[in-house]
Image (spheres, helix red, strand yellow):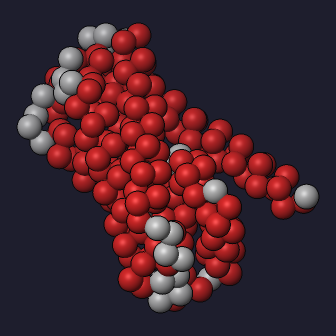
């Protein structure tokens, strides 16, 4: 029954718009599971044949680009101190980290941050607030969004291909793998930042 429901959701005309909305919202609200949505949809694409994997990647990449650009625009208009939550010490330190990294290497920081939920919010807001040139910023975001979407969707598709015809298990396993990979990336980023801070 659940398998039939997932198959019907995957073939629904609303599948890709829903994916777009989740990924777009994830760029602004880090509690939205954008990564999980892309990975699960990639698993459904491989396990059921719909939606097409190329469409999953394209929609996720476009939504990620639009979401990051929206955060940049908010930072450019509002700055990084407009709202109370922005003045919290941990948030301020995240903005300071993002600002110092952006000044040194915009493309590398934007690309890396796309894979780390809170870091990408801080980087994109700070990029706007510090007036990183639009052309350079958007070029980096386009590459990062495409690489992120491809990575997330292919991870899901690989799992779905291993479990063809069983969308329930494919989605469950892909979600577990997406969460595990996210934790590994977060831990690696924290360790790397700690090493740099000690230098």
Q: Is residue 60 left or right of residue 18?
A: right
Residue at the limit of the structure toward the left, as seen here = 13
Residue 55, above or below 86: above
Q: Is residue 27 left or right of residue 53?
A: right
Q: Residue at x 61, y 63 (%)?
A: 102
Q: Position of residue 195 (x, y in %)?
A: 85, 52
Residue at the limit of the structure toward the right, as seen here = 199
Q: Is residue 8 left or right of residue 60?
A: left
Residue 50, above or below 140: above
Decide which of 131, 113 is in the foreground and name it.
Answer: 131
Decide which of 103, 180 is in the foreground and name it.
Answer: 103
Q: Residue at x 65, y 39 (%)?
A: 184
Q: Position of residue 173 (x, y in %)?
A: 45, 25
Q: Position of residue 131 (x, y in %)?
A: 49, 75
Decide which of 126, 168 is in the foreground and name it.
Answer: 126
Q: Quadrant of residue 95?
A: bottom right
* Residue 81 in sight in this render: yes
* Residue 28 in sight in this render: no
Q: Residue at x 67, y 74 (%)?
A: 96
State the quadrant of the N terminus.
top left
Q: Is residue 58 left or right of residue 39?
A: left
* Total count of labels: 0
Q: Position of residue 7 (x, y in %)?
A: 18, 24
Q: Residue at x 31, y 42 (%)?
A: 60
């Amino acid at each position: 029954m659940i398998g039939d429901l997932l198959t019907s959701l995957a073939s629904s005309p609303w599948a890709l718009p829903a994916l777009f909305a989740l990924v777009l919202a994830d760029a602004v609200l880090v509690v939205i599971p954008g990564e999980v949505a892309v990975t699960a949809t990639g698993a459904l694409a491989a396990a059921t044949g719909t939606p097409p994997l190329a469409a999953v990647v394209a929609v996720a990449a476009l939504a990620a680009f639009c979401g990051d650009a929206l955060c940049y625009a908010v930072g450019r208009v509002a700055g990084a101190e407009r709202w109370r939550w922005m003045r919290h010490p941990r948030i301020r330190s995240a903005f300071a980290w993002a600002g110092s990294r952006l000044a040194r290497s915009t493309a590398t920081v934007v690309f890396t941050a796309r894979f780390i939920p809170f870091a990408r919010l801080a980087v994109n807001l700070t990029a706007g607030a510090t007036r990183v040139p639009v052309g350079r910023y958007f070029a980096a975001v386009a590459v990062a969004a495409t690489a992120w979407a491809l990575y997330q969707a292919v991870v899901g598709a690989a799992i779905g291909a291993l479990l063809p015809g069983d969308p329930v298990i494919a989605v469950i396993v892909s979600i577990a793998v997406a969460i595990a990979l996210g934790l590994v990336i977060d831990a690696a980023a924290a360790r790397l930042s700690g090493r740099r801070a000690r230098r």
